[in-house]
Amino acid sequence: MPGKISKRVVSDRLMWVDRMLKEIRSLPLNSKPIFMQDSRNVWAAESCLRRALEAIFDLGRHTLAKGFGEAVTEYKEIAVALNKDEVISAGDFELMLKLAGYRNRLVHFYHDVSADELYEICASHLEDVERIANTLRSWLANHPNSLDETL
């Protein structure tokens, strides 16, 4: 049954995304050789990217559960439902499906994700993660009556 979306959960998940992206951007992404010199950069990039993606999908899941009364668990299903409920556009839907697939690769096929691939994504594609976070942020800002203001 639909209810109110927790402003506390929204704020927490969006702050988490912002924090993880900031951590990734603090890595030496302007130089692949320097990035690769320290293996901790690869592990930090992977962890922060995965956590940012999970926070986005947790926010999507919370929005669907509380705002629309829909129980969705699979990451790609979250994108489908958000598109169906017009929270995200068709373009954002396609991007969110890709992000869901990539998150699943990070978690289930971690052994196939190379350091070169992580570098490329973190150096050139963080705006994709920001785009979805900003889309959710905008939808929530445009639907203030859907939010439970109780912190």
Image (tube, rainbow, N blue to C red):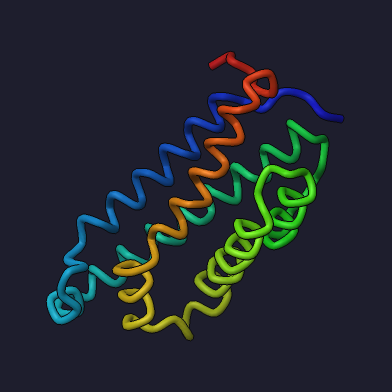
**Which quadrant of the view contains residue 98?**
bottom right
Image height check: is 141 above or below 33?
above
The location of residue 109, given as percent across then percent down, is: 54, 79
Q: Quadrant of residue 34?
A: bottom left
Residue 90 in the figure: left or right of residue 48: right
The total number of labels drawn is 0
Q: Where in the figure is residue 147, as x and y percent of width and height?
A: 64, 22
Which residue lies at the image location 33% right of the left edge and 67% below the top edge? 122
**Which residue corresponds to the image point at 65% horizontal and 48% vertical from the top-left?**
88
Q: Residue at x 46, y 56 (%)?
A: 129
Residue at far right of view? 1
Residue 111, percent from left and from top: 47, 83
| Quarter of the picture holding the N terminus | top right
> In the rendered image of this protein, does residue 11 appear above or below residue 78?
above
19 shown above or below 143? below
Between 73 and 133, the residue placed more toward the observer is: 133
Q: State the residue in front, 36 or 98.
A: 98
Q: Is residue 3 left or right of residue 142?
A: right
Quarter residue 43 falls in: bottom left
Image spot of residue 85 (x, y percent): 78, 44
Q: Nearer the viewer, residue 87 or 34?
A: 87
